[in-house]
Structure formats: C-alpha cells, structure tokens
Amino acid sequence: MTTPSTVFGQELYFASQEVREHRGWFRFLGIVMVLTGIGALLFPFVATLAGTLALGAILLVAGLFGIVHALRVRPWKGFWIGLLISLLTLVIGVLLLGFPMEGIMTVTLLITALFLVSGAFRTILAFQLKPYDSWGWILASGILALLLSVLVITQLPEAALWLIGILVGVDFLFSGWWLLSLTMTSRKQTAPGG
C-alpha cells in the first residue's frame, strides 16, 4: 500500500535526482547569484541606479516592440488597448531612463512589494519542502525578504538611495547559497525504502 509519506519520499527522491542530473547548472547559477549579491552589497547605490536604468531600458524596448506589434495587427479588435499599453510602457521606460533618481522611489516601492510577496511564498515553499535537507535555507530567505520589506517601509524616503542595492544583494546572496546548498544535499538523498 502506498502511503502519503512514501509518495512524498518518492517525489523528493525524483526531485533530488533531477537536481543531481543538472547539478552543474544549479551550481553555476548559485555562484553567479552569490557573486552578484556581493557586488550589490559592496556598491549599493550603483546597484540601485543600475537596476533602475536597466528597468527603464527593458520597458523602453518592450514598449517599442509593443507599438510595432500593435501597428502590424491594426485590424485586430484589441488594437487601441494594445497600443495604449505599449505607449504607457514606452513612456515609463523613457521616464526611468531620463529621471532615474526620481524613479528610484517608485522602484523602491515596487521592490518592497516584490520582497513582501516573494518572502511570503518562499516561507510557504519552505514548509512544503520541510523534510528536504536544505528547506531551512529557503525559509531563511523567505523570512529575510519579509523583514527587509518591513525595513524599507520604515526607512523611507531616505534609505531609497542605497537600500535597493542592499536588498537585492542580500536576496541574491541567500538565493545563491540556497541553490549551492541544494546541489550539495541532492547527493545525500536516497531512494525511498532504501
């Protein structure tokens, strides 16, 4: 008879087997995230400004492609809505590129929301992965993201200039360490009942 614990054990074993098969990619991403996190912690204002400018560039490009798409499918019913959304995306991208310092506050609020939501989801995921050896790292990552979002809210507006870089750095550092930990613990998982 198959019990829920043996089914979960089998799923855990197969998941860890998948991690073992792609261990090099997990390790590579973990190292890149740890190094990126360290860089952001060492240069928080640069990371904040770079993130704002990168977001502006992404929105600019997405807006341009959206406008081209809307014009190419003009007879389509959703032409005006698609065109307006693309124009708005383009304008926001241009504003972030043209006025990055003003955009930092907006980006700070958006990242705060991101950390709040991702922290809650990581905490939930950690409890779903609880029997797995590295579940504590994702729990720590989730709780830390929640705490950092509260810290941002309490330190506004002064901290907006450097806090995004620190938040991203810490988050990348923990996420990278979790991925590295996952590759190390995937070797230890054995087949259920074995």
Image: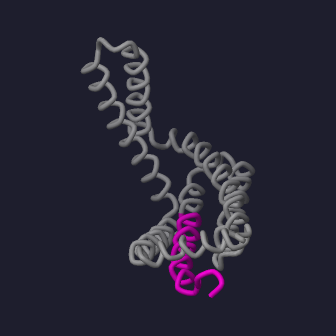
Residue plotted at (74% across, 53% down): 150
Closest to the observer: 67 or 99?
A: 67
Task: Say how many tags the image has.
Answer: 0
Task: Indicate whether residue 19 is drawn in magenta.
Answer: no
Residue plotted at (57% across, 82% down): 185
Quadrant where the N terminus is found in the figure: bottom right
Name of the residue lying farthest toward the left: 72
Span of residues in magenta = 169-194
**Magenta segment main secondary structure:** helix
Residue 26 lies in quadrant = bottom left
For residue 96, side relative to residue 16 (left or right): left
Closest to the observer: 134 or 153?
A: 134
Task: Indicate whether residue 174 is drawn in magenta.
Answer: yes
Residue 36 percent coordinates (x, y): 45, 68
Residue 99 lies in quadrant = top left
Closest to the observer: 9 or 151?
A: 9
Closest to the observer: 22 or 40?
A: 22
Q: Looking at the image, what colour scheme do you see?
A: one colour
Residue 120 percent coordinates (x, y): 70, 54
Residue 155 percent coordinates (x, y): 71, 52
Residue plotted at (43% across, 70% down): 29
For residue 158, above or below residue 16:
above
For residue 164, above or below residue 169:
above
Quadrant where the C terminus is found in the figure: bottom right
Residue plotted at (39% across, 37% down): 59
Name of the residue lying farthest toward the front: 1
Residue 183 percent coordinates (x, y): 50, 79
